[in-house]
Image: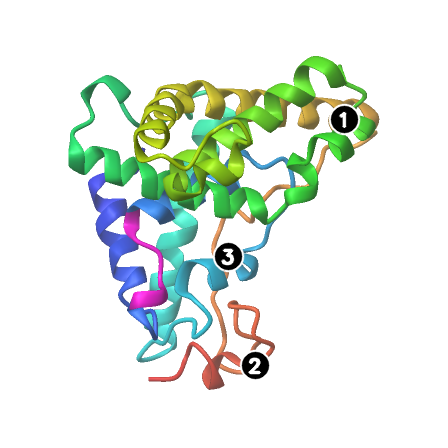
């Protein structure tokens, strides 16, 4: 899904976390961006930073470096969003070719996706969305809820018995269910994308004007005396602009 250059640039971004152990992995960030892109609502970058970097956020040597590094994040987002608009954004793993390392990467990706969906949990909560969208509650609501449970189950296999009431605590049973969830993950992601597209179409039909862009196409520069883009409320020079 990401190019090699984008992966290198985003790895550079993650290295600026004040507490690297609290930051996302690159695979989590890739899943997170996927989730932000498919969510049918505006989310600003300042909402992402706590998830990406952890509570301590990130630090940069100077303003120029901060602008360059944040630019990497927006460039990746914008390209993925362009792929979504072109109908070219899809689940990035080949389930049939996953080895042990690939399986772990996919779990991390699913964890990042789940965190991104949580930014707008009200949109993905079937009852609330179905009331607003006027879609078939019996079929589509169940499909969306099931898709969300599959994503969560793949991301957190240890919690499978808590997510699915009919699954016992035995390791063998959990392993069997986890394997089924992994096989279902591509279709679950496709279900979420289709649901999001339907929500956007309904909103567009109900609106006399086009909806706002999900994220500015260009990354604005951050002045030292401006508010920090991480959303802390501090000036950039006293927050992420610090050494």
Reading the image, the residue beneath label 3 is 48
**Residue stretch rendered in magenta on the structure:** 21-26
Label 2 and label 1: CA atoms lie apart by 39 Å
Does the residue at mark 3 contact the one at mark 2 (Cβ under 8 Å)?
no
At 44% from the left and 35% from the top, the residue drawn is 153
Eyeballing the image, is 29 above or below 92? below
The circle on residue 130 is 1
Per the image, is 23 magenta? yes
* Residue depicted at x 26% and y 21%: 94
Mark 1 vs mark 3, foreground winner is: 1
Horizontal side, residue 132 vs residue 60: left or right: right
Question: Looking at the image, is 134 positioned above or below residue 7?
Answer: above
- Alpha-carbon distance for marks 1 and 3? 26 Å
Residues 120 and 209: in front is 120
Q: Quadrant of the C terminus?
A: bottom left
How much space separates mark 3 and mark 2, taking CA atoms?
17 Å
């Amino acid at each position: 899904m990401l190019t090699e250059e984008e992966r290198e640039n985003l790895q550079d971004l993650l290295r600026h976390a004040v507490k690297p152990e609290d930051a996302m992995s690159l695979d989590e960030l890739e899943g997170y961006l996927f989730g932000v892109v498919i969510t049918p609502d505006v989310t600003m970058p300042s909402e992402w930073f706590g998830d990406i970097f952890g509570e301590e956020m990130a630090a940069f040597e100077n303003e120029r470096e901060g602008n360059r590094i944040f630019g990497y994040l927006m460039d990746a987002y914008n390209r993925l969003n362009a792929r979504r608009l072109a109908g070219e954004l899809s689940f990035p793993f080949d389930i049939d070719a996953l080895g042990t390392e690939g399986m772990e990467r996919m779990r991390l990706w699913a964890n990042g996706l789940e965190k991104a969906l949580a930014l707008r949990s009200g949109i993905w909560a079937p009852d609330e969305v179905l009331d607003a969208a006027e879609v078939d509650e019996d079929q589509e609501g169940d499909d969306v809820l099931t898709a969300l449970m599959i994503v969560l189950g793949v991301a957190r296999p240890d919690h499978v018995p808590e997510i699915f009431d009919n699954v016992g605590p035995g390791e063998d049973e959990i392993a069997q269910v986890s394997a089924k969830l992994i096989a279902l993950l591509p279709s679950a992601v496709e279900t979420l994308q289709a649901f999001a597209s339907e929500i956007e179409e309904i909103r567009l039909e109900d609106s006399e004007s086009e909806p706002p862009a999900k994220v500015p196409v260009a990354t604005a520069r951050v002045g030292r005396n401006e508010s920090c883009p991480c959303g802390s409320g501090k000036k950039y020079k006293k927050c992420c602009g610090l050494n």
